[in-house]
Image (cartoon, grey):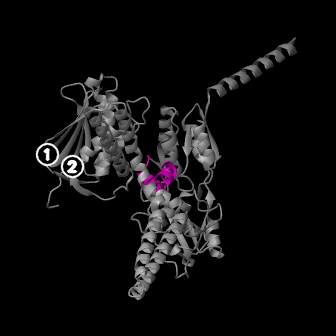
């Protein structure tokens, strides 16, 4: 009997332990983090286990699973919704953010970075004794060792700089030698004369030199570009480092906890730490210039892309045209010379020569017909559509002055609309200015209103009251000022989303206060508490159910970077809020 009771108790205890373990396991949620498979520092692959362990410890109830994926697999996993977070290079992040709406919550910072926005670039190396390679333009026709064409520091950043000096790597202006990872293989290919040049990420040669794996005196950096505060030698401009991004459907509270945990982590053994999300506008400009990532369709829709894709055929056509032109000129010279010699003796030779010239001109025009038709086809196609419709109405007897007027207005409206869209796309994508510019503040505000109204159809009407003198100037980074205004107008529209259309209005007032120019953006949204107002500009504080709480914090940092400030107070009369941007007034004696 004693043995039976003991055995029963043992079975009961085992059952309870198993049940408790299963219950505990059921409460743990698995969160998958997709990591681009090869992140290398100092010639060694980064071990992300420390980050994984820290997240698991700091955020109970979640098990963080790392999945190492190549670029294509990472893209497919995000598309299928298999990942909660993504850790990848800057270029792929911009592509995934554009296509799938992932949101960056933190940016990796290396100890040698000058700032979160200036942390990573490419170093172009050659041997110290190569006197024929001094500038990036000298790389034309050379053998260039790279690890892969999707490596940001090991290829993409340098490809943009080379393209800027007329060396298009994709078009075959140089011979690419693919060596694969790890990145020191590119340097080894340079050492063993398998390549004339090697492209590696910034700071790699400095770290390898500290480890005694190479001598800096053996190599030469091509077109070195010193950057204030950056501890290494770069051949390109610097860009933000890898971001950690949350998938679109990832729980926002979890995203905030992950971001806070990363920010509180001490630097890893390799010196990696985390910062608030950097500005990846420079990456978008790079992608636009190289026509990759979200701008890949420009390769088939823009004139520059068509020239890039069909450059070889266009060169052949150009050589043919030049050859025909030279031949035509030669024929003309010979004909004219022969005509002069035979003019007196053979009267009919001159007439024959004129006919020959005429036929030659017709031949040239015939050869150009296809090109002319291609150039004129697109603008004529739209006009033809409306013209044909008008012709059918004429045939049916339904034409009148009003109809002709409407058709004409429609043609004009469509033309103006297309022109406006093209100009705005060119303005949003253009290179972002890095220095302040002096221009009328009202012009900047009007452009911001125009962009906001175009990008958000159905947005509330915006009323601008300008109390400043006509042509009042502001010295600032006007693209950043527009970024702040567009963000404030979008917040205002979101605050009034539940109001009826006639009650949804955004008011903007330009004015002067003491030594500042002020831009006040007000809405008619619901009132919020004084405590909420106090926390609005804090990172990760948000009143939106799907917000990260970074928009206003970034706007405030932009204002402070311009020696200004961004403040908020209740609208009078209520309800609503007024966000006021103060910027220093420009004076001619500055």
Classify mark 2: helix, strand or loop: helix
Q: Give x and y (percent) for residue 57.
A: 57, 38
Question: How would you classify the magenta stretch by its main secondary structure?
Answer: helix
The residue indicated by pointer 2 is: 441
Q: Is residue 166 above or below residue 525?
A: below
The quadrant of the picture occupied by the C terminus is bottom left
Q: Residue at x 60, y 57 (%)?
A: 40
Q: Give x and y (percent) for residue 269.
A: 57, 55
Q: Residue 96: within the magenta?
A: no
Q: Are marks 2 and 1 in contact (CB under 8 Å)?
A: yes
Seen from this angle, which residue lies furthest left? 469
The residue indicated by pointer 1 is: 468
Magenta highlight range: 276-302
Quadrant housing residue 348: bottom left
Task: State the CA–CA distance, disc 2 to disc 1.
Answer: 9 Å
Classify mark 1: helix, strand or loop: loop
Q: Give x and y (percent) for residue 336.
A: 41, 82
Q: Is residue 311 above or below residue 357?
A: above
């Amino acid at each position: 009997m004693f043995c039976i009771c003991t055995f029963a108790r043992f079975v009961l205890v085992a059952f309870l332990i198993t049940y408790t373990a299963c219950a505990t396991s059921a409460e743990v949620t698995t969160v998958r983090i997709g990591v681009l498979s090869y992140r290398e520092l100092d010639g060694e692959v980064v071990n992300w286990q420390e980050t994984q362990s820290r997240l698991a410890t700091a955020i109970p109830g979640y098990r963080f699973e790392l999945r190492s994926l190549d670029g294509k697999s990472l893209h497919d996993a995000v598309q299928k919704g298999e990942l909660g977070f993504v850790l990848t290079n800057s270029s792929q992040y911009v592509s995934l953010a554009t296509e799938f709406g992932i949101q960056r919550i933190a940016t990796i910072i290396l100890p040698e970075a000058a700032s979160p926005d200036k942390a990573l670039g490419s170093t172009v190396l050659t041997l110290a004794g190569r006197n024929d390679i001094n500038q990036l333009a000298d790389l034309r026709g050379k053998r260039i060792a790279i690890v892969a064409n999707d490596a940001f520091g090991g290829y993409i950043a340098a490809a943009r700089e080379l393209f800027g000096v007329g060396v298009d790597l994709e078009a075959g202006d140089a011979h690419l030698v693919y060596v694969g990872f790890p990145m020191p293989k590119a340097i080894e290919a340079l050492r063993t004369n398998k390549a004339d040049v090697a492209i590696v990420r910034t700071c790699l040669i400095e770290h390898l030199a500290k480890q005694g794996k190479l001598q800096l005196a053996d190599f030469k950096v091509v077109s070195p570009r010193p950057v204030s505060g950056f501890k290494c030698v770069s051949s390109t401009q610097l860009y933000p480092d890898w971001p950690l991004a949350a998938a679109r459907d990832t729980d926002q509270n979890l995203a905030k906890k992950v971001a806070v945990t990363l920010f509180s982590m001490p630097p890893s053994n390799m010196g990696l730490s985390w910062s608030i999300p950097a500005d990846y506008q420079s990456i978008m400009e790079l992608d636009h210039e190289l026509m990759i990532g979200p701008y890949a369709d420009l390769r088939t829709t823009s004139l520059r892309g068509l020239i890039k894709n069909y450059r070889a055929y266009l060169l052949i056509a150009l050589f043919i045209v030049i050859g025909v032109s030279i031949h035509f000129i030669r024929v003309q010279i010979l004909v004219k010379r022969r005509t002069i010699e035979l003019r007196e003796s053979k009267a009919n030779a001159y007439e024959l020569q004129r006919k020959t010239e005429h036929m030659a001109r017709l031949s040239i025009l015939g050869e150009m017909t296809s090109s002319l038709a291609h150039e004129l086809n697109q603008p004529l196609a739209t006009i033809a559509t409306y013209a044909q419709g008008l012709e059918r109405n004429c045939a049916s007897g339904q034409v009148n002055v009003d109809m002709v007027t409407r058709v004409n207005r429609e043609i004009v409206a469509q033309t103006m609309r297309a022109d406006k869209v093209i100009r705005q796309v060119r303005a949003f994508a253009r290179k972002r200015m890095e220095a302040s510019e002096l221009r009328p503040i009202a012009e900047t505000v009007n452009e911001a209103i125009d962009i906001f109204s175009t990008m958000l159809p159905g947005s509330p009407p915006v009323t601008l009251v300008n109390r400043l003198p006509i042509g009042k100037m502001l010295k600032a980074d006007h693209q950043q000022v527009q970024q702040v205004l567009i963000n404030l107008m979008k917040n205002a529209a979101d605050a009034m989303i539940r109001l009826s259309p006639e009650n949804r209005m955004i008011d903007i007032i330009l004015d002067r206060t003491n030594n500042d120019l002020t831009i006040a953006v007000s809405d008619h949204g619901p009132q919020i508490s004084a405590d909420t107002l106090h926390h609005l500009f804090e990172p990760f504080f948000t009143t939106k159910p799907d917000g990260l709480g970074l928009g206003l914090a970034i706007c405030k940092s932009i204002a402070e970077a311009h020696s200004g400030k961004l403040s908020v107070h209740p609208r009078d009369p209520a309800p609503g809020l007024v966000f006021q941007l103060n910027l220093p007034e420009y004076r001619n004696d500055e």
